[in-house]
Amino acid sequence: MKTRSEKTQAAIRREIIEFLNATSGSVDQSPGPSSCGIRHRNALVLATCAGSRARATVLEFFNEGMTLYVFGEPGGKIANIKRNPQVSAVVYEQPLDHGALQKSLQLFGRAELITARGNPRLFWSKIRKWHMEAVGRKIMSPLFQKKNLSGAEAERFVKRGLESLSVIKIIPEHVILKQWNPDFSMQRYEWKIKAS
């Protein structure tokens, strides 16, 4: 029987996916008046770099297996990814509880930008999958009231707002999973993509 430090790459991959499934954002199936439509769990810190300038951004994330998806507004992180698609990300369980097993994940990989203009079919499929149109409506509702927008005008506004986003697809190449135990011991597992 393998000890915890001798896990196979397949077993480590399964644990990483279980962790991501438990920590990523998901659609709120029963949104109340104070819900934006997303069930928030843990955030991701995304690090990008271009030239000699690094940038770290805290973001909501979603996953499909080990592949991560982030909805990014135009700005520094998008500009950095266009220049350098190599990224790093960290996800860690919150709140910190020394009385329970805690996990964290550090990921190194490649980012791709999916846009409404560049790949509309894939872009809108991700928007629909995570109900971003409903989220956009909820988040923009104060602006609609302020501008006195309703119906088709409000829907056009939401669509334009969503089209300004990029879906950042993060494909992992190397992942480090750490498990902190209540006795303060720690196991560290690494998964790496197989070289082709």
Image (cartoon, grey):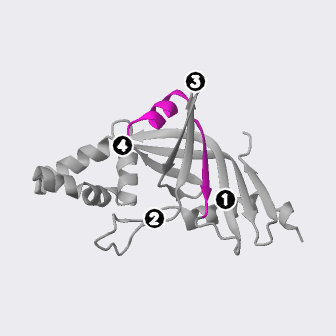
Dots 2, 1 in contact, CB < 8 A: no
SS type, badge 3: loop
Tell me the crowding category of disc 2: few under 14, some 14 to 19, or many 20 or more residues within 10 angstroms, Cα based.
some
Q: Which residues are magenta?
A: 73-93
Tell me the crowding category of disc 1: few under 14, some 14 to 19, or many 20 or more residues within 10 angstroms, Cα based.
some
Dots 3, 4 in contact, CB < 8 A: no
Residue under label 4: 165
> What separation in Å lies between label 1 and label 4 (alpha carbons)?
28 Å
> What separation in Å lies between label 3 and label 1 (alpha carbons)?
28 Å
Residue under label 1: 104
Foreground mark, 1 or 4, reads 1
* Residue nearest the observer in this picture, 193 or 96: 96
* Vertical arrangement, residue 38 with respect to residue 166, above or below: below
* Residue nearest the observer in this picture, 116 or 90: 90
Question: What residue is at 9 percent from the left and 53 percent from the top?
Answer: 148
Q: Amino acid at mark 4?
A: Leu
Residue under label 3: 51
Dots 3, 2 in contact, CB < 8 A: no
Quarter of the figure with the C terminus: top right
Q: Does the magenta segment cover residue 78?
A: yes
Q: Amino acid at mark 3?
A: Gly
Residue under label 2: 40
Question: What residue is at 33 percent from the left and 72 percent from the top?
Answer: 31
Q: Which mark is residue 168?
A: none
